[in-house]
Image: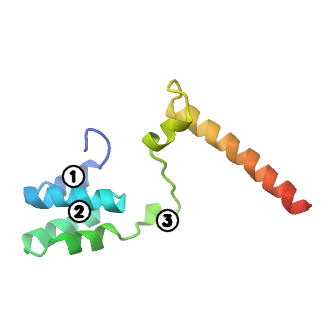
Amino acid sequence: MVDEKKIAFNPAYELSFLKPEEQRQLIVVMDEEQATPSLSQAQRLKKFSAEGKLGYDAMSAIMSEEKKGDLDKVVLNSDVLKKYFPKSYTPLRMQETIIKLLDQWQKKRQQQQER
C-alpha cells in the first residue's frame, strides 16, 4: 500500500507491528470507512494490539474518527471518475474539467436565484 501511495510510510511502519490477522482485518475496516490511518491512529492501533485489545470494534472506532486534514478535503477516486472521461484524460485534465463544470453550475444557480 505504501508503494501504491495508498498509505504513508510512517503509519505503515507502525502497522507492521500488528499481527497478520489484525492487518487483514484492518484492511477491511479501512475499506468500510474509506480511510487510511494517520500516524497517531496507527500508533494507537499498535498500542491496542500490544495490549491484546485490538479487535474489529476498536479498529472501527479509531478509523471512523474525523481527522483534522479531512475536515476541508474532498477526495474523488479516479476509478469512480474514469467512467465520465475519455481514457486519454490525465488526472489533472479531469480536475480542470470538473472545475470548469462546477463554475458553469454555480453561474447557472446564481442566475436562477436572481430571477
Q: Identify the mark nearer the N-term, 2 or 3.
A: 2
Q: Which quarter of the figure is the C terminus placed in?
A: bottom right
Report which residue position mark 2 lands on. 42
58 or 72, nearer to the observer: 58
Name the element at disc 3. loop
Left or right: 92 as drawn, with respect to 7:
right
Disc 1 marks which amino acid? Ala
Report which residue position mark 1 lands on. 12
Q: Is residue 71 above or below residue 109?
A: below
Disc 2 marks which amino acid? Ala
41 or 28, nearer to the observer: 28
Residue appearing at x 44%, y 66% in the figure: 68
The location of residue 8, given as percent across then percent down, is: 29, 49
Inter-mark Cα distance, 2 to 3: 19 Å
Q: Residues within 10 Å of mark 2 (few under 14, many from 20)?
A: many
Q: Is residue 102 above or below residue 57?
A: above
Q: Identify the mark nearer the N-term, 1 or 2.
A: 1
